[in-house]
Image: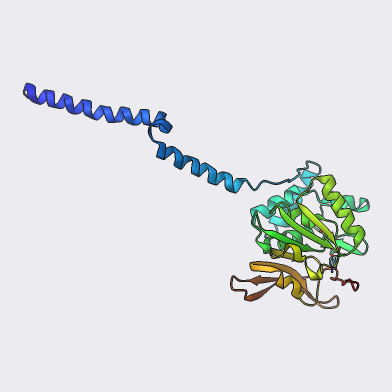
Amino acid sequence: MNRFSLFFIALLFLFMLNPLQSHSSNHNSASDLNPAFTIYDNIQSNNINVSDSLVWDRPRFNEREQEREYLVQTGIIGQGITDPNVIDAMLQVPRHKFIPEEYQRQAYLNIPLPIGHDQTVSQPYIVALMAEMLEIKPGDKVLEIGTGSGYHAAVLSELTPYIYTIEIVEPLGLRAAKLYDDLGYHTIETRIGDGYNGWEEHAPFDKIIVTAAADNIPQPLIDQLGPGGIIAIPVGGQDQTQVLTRLIKDKEGNLRTERVLPVRFVPLTRNNEQ
Ligand code: SAH
């Protein structure tokens, strides 16, 4: 090797070293040297913030947590509910707060319980199943007919901040509205009245849930369901087998129903004055 080729190799070596060094300094101060990279970075974190920015009041309770966990393991996951958001909602909402004093001990059994005025709060499994049937995404606007104890709407309020619920029995509706205030479920709007006619001012809804059984799916509710929406409702009279039914309105407005499970619910009553 002559002197010239040695010099050439040394030059090549220096040249190779330099880009490596400038790459590492680029990495340390990307914002100075490569603004395009930094802007892209910001957009990415903004996007994450956009989806995360739908944050709303979801009160948390430690009381009777172990009973909730046992119920969810055995009666919710154990019976086939798989939607992780629904499972989490069932873990969070303190059912015992919605149950009358005399049934406190049974609050975390997987059974329906009396709530006064001849009404009942559904079995937790059915609450979870109906929530899962609705496929609720954060941001969905949901209407519930039959507030009752207020428990079911509280579970739904874990899934999206836009919950509207109507109760026909005034003392029940008032009690639930007060409970929401006391417990911190501030995203639920409660109304006293006949839910058969829906809630026109807030329509269209993405999802509608009816927690009392009707012979037919009320037409006003179908009309107030937006395209791509879902209704979950028990269909059938008090002397018949009721079937938990899912009605899906596709993007073109076509309706399709699915029969999901035989059930027993209190009847959807009508308010003749309205
Ligand atoms: N979702 C309730 C279940 C309550 S049972 C809960 O979590 O506890 C069904 C409720 O539907 C009862 O409170 C009953 O009074 C109410 N209801 C019956 N017919 C109704 C109607 N037409 N409009 C609104 N609520 C009605």
Pick out the residue farthest to the front.
201
Q: Nearer the viewer, residue 222 or 74?
A: 222
Pick out the residue farthest to the left.
2
Query: In which quadrant of the rendered image does the N terminus lie?
Result: top left
Which x, y percent locates residue 159? 69, 53
In the image, residue 109 sits, relative to residue 66, either above or below, namely below
- Residue 21: image quadrant is top left
Pick out the residue farthest to the top.
3
Colouring used for the render: rainbow
In the image, residue 47 sits, relative to residue 30, either above or below, namely below
Which x, y percent locates residue 269? 87, 71
Q: Name the residue at 61% across, 46% down.
A: 52
- Residue 235: image quadrant is bottom right
In the image, residue 22 sits, relative to residue 95, either above or below, namely above
Across the whole image, how many numbered discs are drawn on residues? 0
In the image, residue 22 sits, relative to residue 42, either above or below, namely above
Q: As drawn, is 131 to the left or to the right of 264?
A: left
Which quarter of the rendered image does ligand 1 occupy? Answer: bottom right
Residue 20 seen by the camera:
yes
Q: Nearer the viewer, residue 39 or 109?
A: 39
Residue 122 seen by the camera:
no
Query: In which quadrant of the rendered image does the C terminus lie?
Result: bottom right
Which x, y percent locates residue 31? 43, 33
Q: As drawn, is 146 to the left or to the right of 251?
A: right
Which x, y percent locates residue 232? 72, 67
Q: Name the residue at 91% across, 61% down.
A: 170
Q: As drawn, is 47 to the left or to the right of 184?
A: left
Q: Name the residue at 64% across, 48% down.
A: 54
Q: Name the residue at 82% across, 57% down.
A: 190
Q: As drawn, is 138 to the left or to the right of 15?
A: right
